[in-house]
Amino acid sequence: MIDFACRQFDINEIIKCGLGLTKTEFEIFTYMIERRKEHTAHDLAKAKRLDLSTVQKALKKLSDMQIAERRQMNLSNGGYIYSYKIKDKSAVISKINHTIKGWAAKVEDELGKWA
């Protein structure tokens, strides 16, 4: 827990909010970061008991945010599937810190207007 003025914040809530993730996206993110290996959408859907399309949307968002790396795996009988892995924690932390600094700047600006 992190104390700020009159409120305590759980670090998971800060990470979730700092990355702009939904509850399900955060669930998938934490599952992947705890396991530190590559996952397919099918594997994640099965493990988390979620609909495949829900997992695919979450993985696309994480990939678009450059939090997850996507790798194409060619299948022996033709076609391909994607596997995903969360990037190094330092990249994720850097993204969260950038967001927090933006929030702090907005607060300072609003306090300046209020003064």
Image (tube, rainbow, N blue to C red):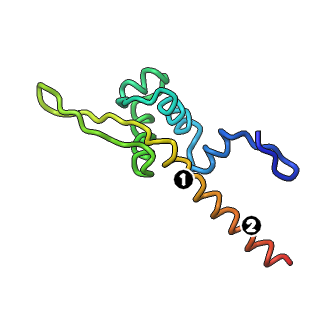
Residue 92: give x, y in percent of width and height.
52, 47
* Number of other residues with Cα within 10 Å of mark 1, as a class: few under 14, some 14 to 19, many 20 or more: few
Left or right, 104 with respect to 7, comes to: left
Residue 60, picture quadrant: top left
Front in this rendered view, residue 97 or 71: 97
Asked if the residues shown at circle 2 and circle 1 are in contact, with their CB atoms under 8 angstroms apart, the answer is: no
Vertical comparison of 96 with 52: above or below: below
Residue 101: give x, y in percent of width and height.
64, 62
Front in this rendered view, residue 93 or 6: 93
Residue at x 44% of width, y 29% of height: 51
- Provide the secondary structure element on which disc 1 rests: helix
The circle drawn on residue 58 is none
Residue at x 65% of width, y 39% of height: 12
Vertical comparison of 17 with 74: above or below: below
Residue 104: give x, y in percent of width and height.
70, 63
Residue at x 46% of width, y 21% of height: 47
The residue carrying mark 1 is: 94
Vertical comparison of 115 with 49: above or below: below
- Quarter of the image that includes the C terminus: bottom right
The residue carrying mark 2 is: 107
- Which of the two labelled residues, at mark 2 and mark 1, occupies the earlier sequence position? 1
* Number of other residues with Cα within 10 Å of mark 2, as a class: few under 14, some 14 to 19, many 20 or more: few
- Provide the secondary structure element on which disc 2 rests: helix
Which of label 2 and label 1 is nearer to you? 1
- Quarter of the image that includes the N terminus: top right
Front in this rendered view, residue 42 or 109: 109
Three-letter code, disc 2: Val
Three-letter code, disc 1: Ser
